[in-house]
Image (cartoon, helix red, strand yellow):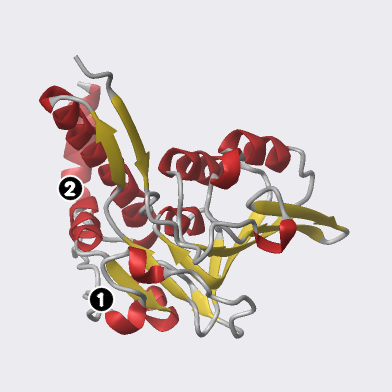
Amino acid sequence: MAAKRYRIVNSARLRMARPVAKLREGRTDWYRITNRSDGAEIYIYDEIGYFGTTAKDFVHDLNEIDRDRIALHLNTPGGEVFDGFAIYEALRQHRAEITVYVDALAASIGSVIAMAGDHRIVARQSQMMIHDGMGICVGNAADMAEMINQLDRVSDNIASVYADRAGGTPRQWRDRMKAETWYSAKEAVEAGLADEVAGNSSASNSWDLSIYGYAGRGNAPAPELDPVPTIAATWDPSMFRAAVRGALA
């Protein structure tokens, strides 16, 4: 029986998003943190989890930040999905007020990390992309079936993050993920994935986006931007009092 091996990523890891697999700017990690007097700045400008620097390292460094404000800058095509979730949760639990800046690209699990911001700002020329989780698996039919279930669970979790931060339902977001949906900065705000458009892109979007179904927003269909329906509620004091009496009976 073949050994079961699978790995879930939220970008096409077998085909790198970088034109040449090399470290940017000679760095040995995919993020950097700078402490300033008025807060901390974090830059995730690479593939998440690239070259063995995992979320464990990021979370450790994040927890060392003793500041009231954090500015998180993103320019990433995605990466390891579980690392991305760990980063998202660590950011949400941090005591600091977090402002996320999408400087050029927040794709795949990078768009989930963007949802960690108390305030989310996208530069005018930036893009965001959401899609279903992807992975590779070696094994028999049972292993493949398990991989399918695992991918569905992961993708449902991702959809729930979008629903929590942008409105709508996980089912709606899962449908958009299955279609691989790209957003311009303005469209990201309209969809609820960001709060405002401000400034110009401060980073070069040099990623090889051909690894995806659509190589960027310019090659993708217009995203679904239907407003989230609201349910009108009526207040009936008599029904409320009756419910209270029933609960106390």
Circle 1 Cα neighbour tier, 10 Å, few/some/many (<14 / 14–19 / ≥20): some
Outermost residue to the left: 141
> Taking 240 as reference, is 135 left or right?
right
Tell me the SS state at disc 1.
Answer: loop
Question: Of discs 2 and 1, which sits in the foreground?
Answer: 1
Residue 238: image tag = 2
Which quarter of the rendering shows the N terminus? Answer: top left
Residue at (33, 48) in percent of width and height: 158
Residue 179: image tag = none
- Which amino acid type is marked by label 2? Ser
Q: Is residue 234 visible?
A: no
Residue 163 pos. (x, y %): 31, 55
Q: Which residue is mark 1?
A: 223
Looking at the image, tell me whether mark 2 or mark 1 is earlier in sequence order: 1
Who is closer to the viewer here, 249 or 183? 183
Tell me the SS state at disc 2.
Answer: helix
- Depicted 79 relative to depicted 129: above or below: above
Which quarter of the rendering shows the C terminus? Answer: top left
